[in-house]
Amino acid sequence: MTLGPDRDPDRPQRDGVFARLEGHEQVVHCEDRESGLRAIIAVHSTALGPALGGTRFHPYADEQAALEDVLALSRGMTYKNALAGLDHGGGKAVIIGDPRTDKSEVLLRAYGRFVASLGGRYVTACDVGTYSEDMDVVARECDFATGRTVEHGGAGDSSVLTAYGVFQGMRAAAESVWGAPTLAGRTVGVAGVGKVGRHLVRHLLEDGARVLVTDVWQPAVDAVVASHPEVRAVPDTDALIASPLDVYAPCALGGALDEPVTDALTARIVCGAANNQLAGDEVGARLLDRGITYAPDYCVNAGGVVQVADELDGFSFERAQRRAAKIFDTTREVLRVADAEGISPAVAADRVAEQRIAGVSRLGAIRVGR
């Protein structure tokens, strides 16, 4: 995604710490020495409503790495929520530490008190390293946690609808490239078969696709192959990219698409669940030059945020799935705009999202003015 709304040439140039936070409404450092909590909450925009985005629990190398990640992720959530048609702005939080050893009830509750201190400007949910059970604990301290377990009135695992939305986006991309919204008879390579990837594999097989998989965690691969013996596993991502593919689906960590990967791809479509897939803006242009259709990540992987947003209204899986199914139409529109204007789908997605943010924000200003 580009950073258009954050780069206003009429604003005075800043330096120092505020330059790094440019475009964000609020960035909060959270520390609780008793529990060991170190966290950052970033509210990028509340133009469309309360900022909504997950909490990532990760052993960052240092606080600088954590800050850079949360700023990029929160900005991405503004675009994702806008493109998904949600009445939410973008926010994100990161907790610095190893979730396998540092996570505790006292830490999560301390974090929940920090979320509560923002008074509803930020609504949190699950992300890498956090689960629905963790949101149940956070919710004991605040009313602004979603993605909770079914037992506590929540929607449960959001990866189900994330995968469903990616599949719908992939169908739209297939229609754009091959003229029919199906993956039947196509070969799809899925990199990462954890929370989301394993559900995506099932949708692809049911649609008649041939599926290749890889993951850095071998038990994840073993589980998918055990459930679906027709799936073929390859040793690593390099081997997957080098395989003859129709579609490449990055479903692990961000930055999966750099220029060497783009140049090596045989796939006609890239469509996956990972966030921030493009290593740089130039990669989107390179994909376009090579005739590879890129279904923008934050467009197709919005099913999870659609699910957790629905929970705030009293969760209905059927209603949330109907909303997630609209990712097909959104992806189709983004690809149409890209084709009509001769721009990359990544740039087209940004423009569609920015138009909604600007339009709704103006309406909001008119209402306030009255």
Image (cartoon, rainbow, N blue to C red):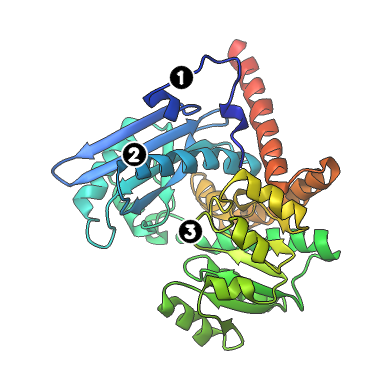
- Count neighbours of disc 3 (C-alpha within 10 A) and say few if under 14, some if 14 to 19, many if 20 or more: some
- Count neighbours of disc 1 (C-alpha within 10 A) and say few if under 14, some if 14 to 19, many if 20 or more: few
Q: CA distance from mark 3 to mark 1?
A: 31 Å
The type of residue carrying mark 2 is Ile
Q: Report the disc number at residue 14.
A: 1
Look at the image and tell me in which quarter the C terminus lies: top right
Vertical side of 23 occupied by 210: above or below: below
Q: Report the disc number at residue 40.
A: 2
Residue 57: percent from the left, percent from the top? 34, 52
Is residue 271 at all visible to an observer of this figure?
no
**Mark 2 or mark 1, whichever is nearer to me:** 1
Residue 46: percent from the left, percent from the top? 51, 29
In the rendered image, which residue does mark 3 sit on?
253
Determine whether label 2 and label 1 are within 8 Å by CB: no
Residue 222: percent from the left, percent from the top? 46, 83
Image quadrant of residue 202?
Answer: bottom right
Q: Residue at position x 38%, y 58% from top?
A: 131
Residue 58: percent from the left, percent from the top? 34, 54
Q: Report the disc number at residue 57.
A: none
Vertical side of 232 occupied by 327: above or below: above
Vertical side of 369 occupied by 71: above or below: below
Q: CA distance from mark 2 to mark 1?
A: 22 Å
In the image, taking residue 309 as reference, residue 104 lies left or right, namely left
Comes first in the chain, label 3 or label 2: 2
Q: What secondary structure is marked by label 1?
A: loop
Look at the image and tell me in which quarter the N terminus lies: top right
**Mark 3 or mark 2, whichever is nearer to me:** 3
Comes first in the chain, label 2 or label 1: 1
The type of residue carrying mark 3 is Leu
The type of residue carrying mark 1 is Arg
Image quadrant of residue 165?
Answer: bottom right
Q: Residue at position x 48%, y 32% from top?
A: 44
